[in-house]
Amino acid sequence: MSHDKLRIGFIGGGNMAQAIVGGLLQAGHVPSLISISEPQESARRRLAALAGGLALGTDNAAVAGSADVLVLAVKPQVMSAVLPAIAAASRPDGQLVVSVAAGIPIATLAAAFGSAAAIVRIMPNQPALVGAGMSVLAARTGTGAACRARAQYVAETTGKALWIADESLMDAVTAVSGSGPAYFYLLMEVMEQTARELGLPADAAAAMVRQTALGAAISAGSVGADLAALRASVTSPGGTTAAALAVMDQASLRETVRRAIVAARDRGAELGRSVR
Ligand SMILES: NC(=O)c1ccc[n+]([C@@H]2O[C@H](COP(=O)([O-])OP(=O)(O)OC[C@H]3O[C@@H](n4cnc5c(N)ncnc54)[C@H](OP(=O)(O)O)[C@@H]3O)[C@@H](O)[C@H]2O)c1
């Protein structure tokens, strides 16, 4: 079946589901093939505003029973409460289960959906909400190529997608791309604040910092870009950038960032143990 003919069902219609539904619609997916179970009327209204014809309701079992691809998009803390009823209603005939819930391992989903279920876990990140997400996917062993391709189709509606073979790296993924946007926001906040302190008007400071971040991200994302070489190319010996980087080196910025990411990875593992 071609991907645009798939019936895609969502359990939970919050921010991440809305981002994926928006991406599916933009990719040309027919609204009537998309069903969403979501208890909040306000969230259902936001979904309804994306397109007419979406199947919106509050019946998890109905969605689970009809979808070719079932996307679990509830908060991790409620996953264990919703899984039994969804799994009981799910289709035994080749349905793909996709979870975007942070920290919920494939084994937890497999225990609910049974030995034959095809399962893919996706770790998206916040820029998915603007179509510039980084999603990292891991599949249950035995999940076939067709199901993997379906999961990738769903993930790519919100940005880039890549696979990891070893699910145990998901906590590291969470620390790098899941939490990563916050690290860049922090740096941009400090840059904007300092720009204002140096006398620049607030709107100019905001425009300069955000466009500079975007420009650096686009440069870094171009094929074959080498980060150290890009940095060196704006750092003349004895110049302004060199003066700034020397201060960052003296403050052990590299080691601080490294320790921050390791702390995020360790916290992810800890939280994962508490929601499983
Ligand atoms: N947002 C992100 O940037 C991001 C990034 C990475 C991963 N994720 C993952 O994506 C998942 C969803 O996150 P989100 O930000 O979209 O959260 P969200 O906006 O809170 O959406 C979850 C939705 O599920 C609904 N829900 C709660 N219980 C339900 C039930 N029994 N049946 C059906 N729906 C139910 C919630 O309704 P109530 O408000 O009534 O509870 C809420 O509207 C999470 O597991 C999160 O880990 C999100």
Image (cartoon, rainbow, N blue to C red):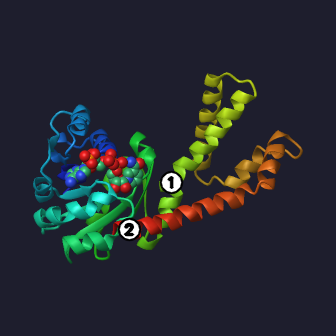
Q: Residue at x 53, y 58 (%)?
A: 176
Report the disc number at residue 91.
Answer: none
Q: Is residue 52 left or right of residue 237?
A: left
Looking at the picture, how far across and down is residue 135, in whole percent?
42, 55
Question: Is label 2 in a helix, a strand or a loop?
Answer: helix
Q: Amino acid at mark 1?
A: Ser
Report the disc number at residue 179.
Answer: 1
Frontmost residue, 258 versus 169 = 258
Q: Quadrant of residue 206?
A: top right
* Mark 1: few/some/many CA within 10 Å (<14, 14-19, 20+): some
* Mark 2: few/some/many CA within 10 Å (<14, 14-19, 20+): few
Looking at the picture, how far across and down is residue 163, in whole percent?
42, 64
Q: Residue at x 21, y 78 (%)?
A: 115
Q: Is residue 238 left or right of residue 272?
A: right
Q: Nearer the viewer, mark 1 or mark 2?
A: 2
Nearer-N-terminus badge (1/2)? 1
Q: Could you tell me if residue 222 is visible in this image?
A: no
Q: Could you tell me if residue 258 is visible in this image?
A: yes
Residue under label 2: 274
| Quadrant of the image containing the N terminus | bottom left
Gap in Å between the C-alphas at discs 1 and 2?
A: 19 Å
Frontmost residue, 132 versus 37 = 37
Looking at the picture, how far across and down is residue 119, in whole percent?
27, 67
